[in-house]
Image (spheres, rainbow, N blue to C red):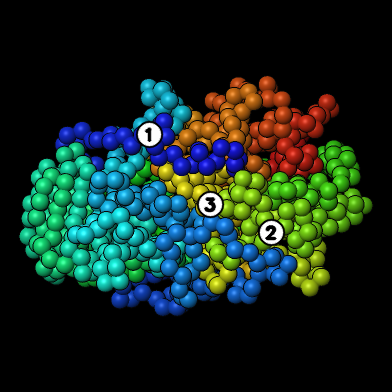
Amino acid sequence: MGFTRLKNALKEIGGSKKDEQQVLKPDNELNVQEDQNDQAPKQSNEQPLFQATQENQSTESEVPPLNVSSQKSVSTIAADIFSAPILNTEPPSNFERVGHPQQPIGCKFRSNDQPIQTNNFSNNLTLDDQTCPVWTLPYSLWLSRDPGQDVGLAFNHTDNVQKVYGPDPNSNPAQFYFNPPKIKSFVISGEGFGQNTKLELENHNKMSITGKMVMNSNQSVTIPLVQGMGFVTAIYTNVKPVLASQVGVQEFRKVGSMGNNVTKYTAKLFNQVVWSLYVVGTNELTLRDPNHIIGDKEGSTIQICRGDSQFYDESAGAYQNSVTLKGSVNADKCQYQFEYAMEGISKLGKGIVWCLPHHQEELIPDIKNTFTNLKLDSTTNGVMQAYSTNSLIMEETLPVDIGFEPWASFAKTPNYSSEVKDLIKMAASIEVNDDVFNMANLDSMYGSGKILDKYAYIAYVCKFILKDDKLTAIILPKVKSAIEMFAKNEQKLPLVYDTTWKGLRSSAEPGADFGNSNYNDHHFHYGYHIHAIALIAKIDSDWLKSNSNLVLNYSNALLRDVANPQADEFFPQFRSFDWYHGHSFAHGIFPSGDGKNEESSSEDYHFAYGMKLFASVVGDINMEHRANLMLAIMRRSMNMYMLYSDDNKIQPPNFIKNKVSGILFENKIDFTTFFGRGTIADEFIHGIHMLPITPISSFIRKEQFVKEEWEQKLGKIVDRIPDGWKGILMLNRALYDPKAAWNWFARDDWNPNLIDNGMSRTWSLAFIAGIGGAP
């Protein structure tokens, strides 16, 4: 959202807030703990959906039957819901084929490579000079080319005590916090590395990528980058290892053999942080000087991790190089899996995988039982835990009962009395007369999508709630015609198919339409279109396939661009949704010192909700499963990382009183938006996490949270808000106090200037009455 000052705002390393401060940890305060007081749980006899050992990994799209003891009945299990892309065909021909002016940096283009990701954790390494960090978590890594220092891939981990709060570090709540960037605990380098050494990228996948520091065709160091990886692993080929440290090594010692041709060393840096180093092979490491550990011969694999633990010892020698996403559904339960492909050999035959808090809550018992008692702070997502496994398997309960109709968690009885319907009809009778086609023909996929969604909801209300054929006949053709304009690609700024990054993007300049042409916000923009199409198709399902599948083909192209379950030749896998973080990232191909970001949690889940409804109309059960799963995961993750109830245990105590994150980056959280804070106070920041209000809103935004946010923040400012943000806040109020919201929307002195241009009074009244707000 908001492109003004975007480039300067996003590439923030070196900015005034964080000029490479080396905020070091106090002496003897290590954050990696092997908690001796924590007793490992007993082994469970319950078999998981997926086998966690490498030898028993399922192949192709085969998924074993689900075994969930809590299920009342067992139904037929669908195949892996991620097993195939939406389509394998070319995008519709009415989208012109063009190359992108910004080429990916350092990427190898091979016939079997997936399309290069644009909104992914690894994306910074494909942009600019490749020196902005990426966060695999718990580690951050970046290309180091600083003059006079060792060239290589640097990495670090930061603790909570190093977080920097501002602008007043003593305020509660603080406006922002960030983790000090680019502290070079280690730099993976090699003898002979210099400015001519290149970072190449290959094996492009959603949750992993392989970096290779290349001197020449025969000499290189390969570093797999995998989300949640337990070790930073460097595979040396015809290069003598050099491990540089700008922090400096205070103590270095050889521990000895761990078996399996693995030798262990420990290094205590001058910031008093202990790291374990493992050498696979015969290379002998020595401390040449406080800033360099070197090997005595070419070759070998070196693995480094924060802390010292027998679990590291027993996992050393094995490392992750890619991840396969799998999932299977039984009734309202879904187990989904990160299946890690392993290389090398360890004592346990397993690696170490780090989990975020939302993973920890939903791990199946057999995976929970592999907890190592190792913990590390993440950058913005609380305390991570490490598990000894080659597979993470989580289970979620899906929102299968939430559909098109108004819904709220407190399940009030709908009231569509004749008086209520008369008021809704009065509002609809005015709004159906608007010029939808020209209102929607904007130079913005985002702005036009909001207009289409607004009037699609009016049509839905006229058809299914008012059951008024006359009003439906007025508004329905208008919305259909406006959507068909986009399906024909005849709007002011047509979409193009980008043959470079492989996606459907705006033909606008990067600075227009919120950066759509550089892949910003695609799920926000296209989510409105998909949701609008689903509403109209609910009224007339034949419309999708009329005119040679015009709207159906358009819909599939948008869905493939954002949420393809598998990469195909034309689109990547899940461009926006980050399955490891549990939500999407809106930030596209702009380098960013703080990593990817998202400022609108609500428009994130609005896309998934639109996909869910669309899938239900067209009968694509696996797409509906995926959308439901995304929503279930977002409900958990967003209430940890973005929406803060008073009892939130994830975010710092001096940040929770903000109630919402504002902009959540990989490396910081800033209580603001890209387009300002608000006309009166902070209404933009809160409102951007609300809009649009739909039946799925109450599923994500829990009643207690909405009440707290209103009483602590919004109720104090709402009466002074002079514009459409007031309507957003008032409709959101219905999620805990629908009667108060009804009274505001139903009053006689109605002012249409107080609702957002993507809102209608028709839908607002229908929604509130549908969740029990009408008298």
Residue 523 falls left or right of residue 397:
right
Q: Is residue 239 above or below residue 680?
A: below
Left or right of residue 492, residue 695 in this image = left
The kind of secondary structure element at disc 1 is loop
In which quadrant will I find the N terminus?
A: top right
- Please report the residue visible at 68 percent of the width from the left and 21 percent of the height from the top: 720
Callout 3, which amino acid? Gly
Q: Against 321, is 289 above or below?
A: above
Residue beneath the point at 53% across and 52% down: 588
Q: Nearer the viewer, residue 610 or 276?
A: 276
Report whether residue 45 is seen.
no
Secondary element type, mark 3: loop
The local crowd at label 3, few if under 14, some if 14 to 19, many if 20 or more residues have their Cα within 10 Å, is: many
Determine which residue is flagged by label 2: 495
Determine contact: label 1, label 2, CB under 8 Å: no
Identify which amino acid the numbered label 2 is placed on.
Leu
- From the image, which quarter does the C terminus lie in? top right
Q: Amino acid at mark 1?
A: Lys
Q: Give the Cα separation between the discs numbered 1 and 3.
A: 23 Å
Marks 2 and 3: CB-CB under 8 Å?
no
Specify whether 183 is left or right of 595.
left
Which residue is identified by label 1?
A: 18
Give how far across and how far down residue 473 sits, in percent.
Answer: 90, 55
Depth check: give the residue in front, 580 or 157: 157
Instruction: Relative to 524, say whether 94 is above or below.
Output: below
Name the disc covering residue 588, or none.
3
Q: Secondary structure at mark 2?
A: strand
Q: Residue at x 67, y 55 (%)?
A: 507
